Amino acid sequence: MQPTLLLASRVSESFHECLKARFRVVEATAAGFDAAVAALAPELAGEIRIVVAFGSTHMPGASLARLPQLGLICCLGSGYDGIDLNYAAERGIAVTNSPGANARSVADLAMAMGLLISSVRNLPAARHYLEAGRWQGNAGERMQPVHGLTGRRLGICGLGAIGLNVARRAAAFDMEVGYHGRHVRPEVPYPYFDSIVQLATWADVLVVSLRADAGTYHAIDAAVLQALGPDGFLINVSRGTTVDEAALLQALKTGRIAGAGLDVYEHEPAIPGELFQLPHVALTPHIGGSTLEAAQEQEACVLANIEAYLRGEPPRTPVSP
C-alpha cells in the first residue's frame, strides 16, 4: 500500500503528478494548516505519515498532534519558520528543508536587474516618466542622476547560501562587501561586523538574507535604519518578519533612508498601500525563489528526503530546533 502524504501547499502540476504516482496524496481542502487537518476524517488523519508544504506554513504542535502516524515534514524551500520544531523533536518527527535550492534565484532577484538596481537606479520612476510622455530625448527634460553601484558598500545581513550568492554577484558590480551573521566565516574574504548596526553604519546598501526565527524577529529596526542613513538602501529577500515594517515605512517617508527593494512583507499577503506611493521603492510579490530551476531542485530534495525516510535512513537535509 502506498504511504499517505498530506500536501498542504500548492505545487507545480508536474510535481503534483509525480507525488500522486508514488504516494497516496491527500490534499488540504481548507485554507490554513489548522483548518485543513481539522477537516480530515479521523481515520484518514491517522494514516498520514508525510507532510509536504512550504516552510512558512503555520504548523503548530496542536495540529500536528492530530496526525498520530506523522514521521516526516518536508519543507519546500530553505525556510522552516512555520513549523513547531520543539514539538516535532519531542514526537520524533523529522523535519527537512531544501537548503540552497533557491539561493541563486533569490540572489538574482536581489542583485542583477532585480531589487537592488531597480531601487537604487529608481527604475519604477523611470517607467512612469516614460509613460507620462516626459522623455523628449537629450534636448528635453532629464531625470535627476543618481548614484550608481560601482565602488559602493554592500552589507549582507546573514551570510548563508543566499548571502554568499549575493556577495558573488556584487563582485560583478565592483562593490565592497561586508557581512554580519551568527558566526564569523574565516573562509570568506569579506570583513565581519559584530552587530547589524555596525554593518548598517558602514554600508550604502543593506541586503537582508536572514533565516526567520525568534532571534531575527525585527532584527532590522529603527536603530538599524537610522544607522543606514539618508543615502542608504534596504533590500529584503528573506522573510518580512525580519524587518520592523512600521519603522521602515517611517524611515522611507521621512527620508531617514533613501529607498528599499522588498520581495517579502511582515504581514503577507497584505502590503502597506503607502509603499506603492514612495520613490525609490521596488516591490515584488515574494517571487525570489520562483524560478523553474529552483522549483526543480526543491522538488528533488523533497523526494530524496522522503525516499530516505521510507527506507529507514536519516533524512538528507534535516533541521532541528
Image (tube, rainbow, N blue to C red):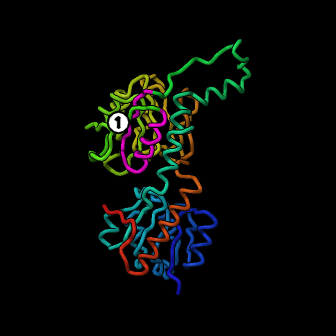
Query: Residue 41 appears at what percent x and percent y?
Result: 52, 78
Residue at 44% over, 34% down: 234
Residue at 31% over, 48% down: 215
Query: Residue 315 appears at what percent x and percent y?
Result: 38, 71
Region of the chain picked out in magenta, as a range? 151-173
Query: Residue 267 appears at what percent x and percent y?
Result: 48, 46
Q: Quadrant of residue 279?
A: top right
Residue located farthest toward the bottom when viewing the structure as drawn:
1
Q: Quadrant of residue 233?
A: top left
Label 1 Cα crowd, 10 Å radius (few <14 / some 14-19 / many 20+): many
Query: Residue 32 appears at what percent x and percent y?
Result: 51, 61
Secondary structure of residue under mark 1 = strand
Q: Is residue 202 visible?
A: yes
* Mark count: 1
Name the residue carrying label 1: 178
Q: Is residue 56 visible?
A: no
- Foreground: 222 or 45? 222
Asked whether 215 falls inside the magenta stretch, the response is no
Residue located farthest toward the top when viewing the structure as drawn:
139
Judge whether 137 appears above or below 5 on screen. Answer: above
Judge whether 238 appears above or below 252 on screen. Answer: below
Is residue 20 rendered to the left or right of residue 75?
right
Asked whether 153 falls inside the magenta stretch, the response is yes
Residue at 36% over, 41% down: 157
Identity, as a three-letter code, of the amino acid under mark 1: Gly
